[in-house]
Image (cartoon, rainbow, N blue to C red):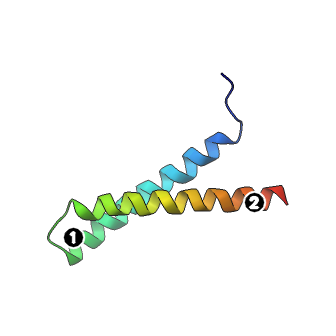
Amino acid sequence: MEQNPESWRIVIYTGSGMAIGAALGLLFSLMLFENVIAGPLAGVVVGAVIGMIWELQSKRRRTR
């Protein structure tokens, strides 16, 4: 089973997006809401989506 040499980029961008999203979600949930659990979970989801979009955009720039 060979691994695509570019597949590590997906993990890096998505993982970093999830980490940053969770941190920002925790900060905003502590400031604005009383429910501390919902903020980081929402941040992880949003961060993962942003990380995947970032990776797709960088792939498009590399292929031009």
Please state if 42 lies on the left or on the right of 52 as rendered.
Answer: left
Residue type pointed to by label 2: Arg
Which structural element holds mark 1? helix
Q: Which mark lies nearer to you, 2 or 1?
A: 2
Earlier sequence position, callout 2 versus callout 1: 1
Location of residue 9 with respect to 40 vertically, above or below: above
Please state if 39 lies on the left or on the right of 8 as rendered.
Answer: left
> Dividing the image into 4 quarters, which one contains the C terminus?
bottom right
Q: Quick one: label 1, few (<14), some, or many (20+) residues within 10 Å?
A: some
Which structural element holds mark 2? helix
Q: Where is residue 53 in the image (x, y as percent from the top left)?
A: 59, 61
Residue type pointed to by label 1: Leu
Residue that label 1 marks: 30
Query: Farthest right residue?
Result: 64
Query: Farthest left residue?
Result: 34
Q: Where is residue 4 in the image (x, y as percent from the top left)?
A: 70, 35
Disc ID at residue 60: 2
Location of residue 30 with respect to 14 vertically, above or below: below
- Separation of residues labelled 2 and 1 (CA atoms): 37 Å
